[in-house]
Image (cartoon, grey):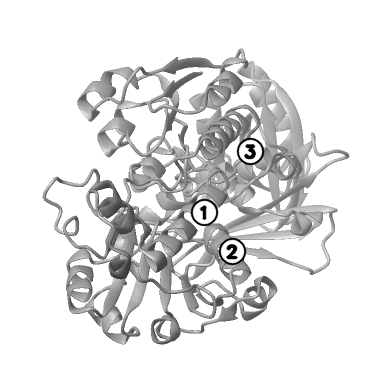
Amino acid sequence: MKIIVCDPISPKGIALLQQRPEFQVVVLPKRLSEAELLPLVADATALVVRSETKVTKKVIEAAKQLRVVGRAGVGVDNVDIEAATQHGTVVMNTPGGNTVTTAELTFTMLLSLARKVPQAHATMVAGKWDRKLFQGVELQGKTLGVLGFGRIGTEVAKRAIAFGMRVVAYDPYLTEDRAKAIGAEFAPEVDNVYREADFITVHMPVTKETKYMLNNEAFAKMKPGVRIVNCARGEIIEEVALESALKSGKVAGAALDVFQIEPLPADYFLRSLPNVILTPHLGASTEEAQEKCGIEVAEVIAGYLLTGEVRNAVNLPYLDAKTYEQVKPYLPLGEALGKLLSQLATATADRIYITYGGNARLLPNIDPVTRAVLRGFLSGSNLKDVNNVNVRAAAASIGITVEEKKSDEPVTFNEWVHVQIFSDGKKLISAGGTFFGSPNNPRIVRLFSQSVEIPVTGTLLLLNNTDKPGIVGHLGTLLAKHKVNIASMSLGRDTVGGLALTVLSLDSAPPQAVLDELKKDTDISNVKVVRL
């Protein structure tokens, strides 16, 4: 598997990848443009980047074998997530590697704003001694508003509390109990932070809700003389609005490490303002952070490619190695159920309902099994290159909604996965599966509401027949005539003498002549060949 390291990462991270014989590691000597990168990625299984290399839609589409993009750092703005998901490529980052580093830079910015250190230094270098110009403020007793209370926001809060600051935290996913556990106050609305904070620091990702959230309206709600720090993402602050607030005095100072356009143009309008501190995106720029991120990105890529472990993915739910081993036996069962039902459904499906019962309901993560069911169901569609990453999006693209349920209702089997297919509110077909003896022996045991015993691989011949003597012998004779061997047989019926369901597992596909003869028999109907 070819891994291309596009941007500089820790040598220890590269060495971790190189020590695996399964990997061919290519380290690019410099950052390449999109055009330069395209011919190199054709056979790449993984790309490792920092913030410099842009993994665009064109790059992703050119990398036919690309399974994972690893970002050594938190932000994935330089990766086209939507294109990666459609391509079936996992995008992983390293949120833990630069947590402390970014928190420390943020606090450096707070202190620098409070005491005007960079401005004072600049005058000293220029040969001046202007003490009166640089009277600052203390942090002790001031209120720090933290927007975004994840890893970095939490670490900043801890340091602020140690300095005697009052911390008010806002995050749409934050609970009051968690805020209290850190020693912060919970802000139910972002306006609470705007009204109360003397300093505001931002630690949120860029989303539709957070882009330009610090705008003219937000600044108008803040205290006069508030100070702003942004070491998260430049797009969170509307820079033109910040300029106006700085010039009017509404905002006493701002310290920015990130910007809407990077690198900054030489004529960037905030460069000339005396109450602004600018740094060139140094959030993760420490020796320790670079080493941590390099090692972590190597570990997450290796874990995914070698064991299926999904860690720190931004477009696929978390799946550690232990959980993967627990769900792994269910994957071929789920895929077989999906394949079977897709070939038997008599109309276009618009809803798939999956029930997990017995021990299956205890699985810590059922998402991989659901994805296996969907992958099997969509395998017969016109959709191309459907895999675990893009299968939910693929199903949604053709109008299929997916519902999952962990059921406590009693079931006949220790493990139970049941799949129902619906169209226009009507159930078309359903099937259920379990394990016989061990997780290595999955079986489909329910079909058309009848008991069956079907292996999850191979070719199946399914048919309904009148429940009367001689049918089984007739089937065996007919198949033997055409040199088709029966591997196993499952028989079920609704009532004695009623309609029976017969499922034959075959060593090879029956020729058309067999199917034609079966369809002529008045005691046989619904003849179908299914390939699992």
Judge the density around disc 2: few (<14), some (14-19), many (≥20) Cα neighbours within 10 Å.
some
Residue 316 horizontal side relative to residue 38, left or right: right
| Residue assigned mark 2 | 159
Earlier sequence position, callout 3 versus callout 2: 2
Residue 57 horizontal side relative to residue 440, left or right: left
| Residue assigned mark 1 | 104
Q: Secondary structure at mark 3?
A: loop
Please tell me in which quadrant of the rendered image residue 309 appears: top right
For the residues labelled 3 and 1, the Cα–Cα distance comes to 31 Å
Earlier sequence position, callout 1 versus callout 2: 1
305 in relation to 150, above or below: above
| Residue assigned mark 3 | 309
Pointer 1 and pointer 2: residues touching (CB < 8 Å)? yes
**Amino acid at circle 1:** Glu
Identify the residue at horizontal 70%, vertical 24% (top origin).
477
Q: Nearer the viewer, residue 368 or 468?
A: 368
- Most distant residue in the right direction: 437
For the residues labelled 3 and 2, the Cα–Cα distance comes to 34 Å
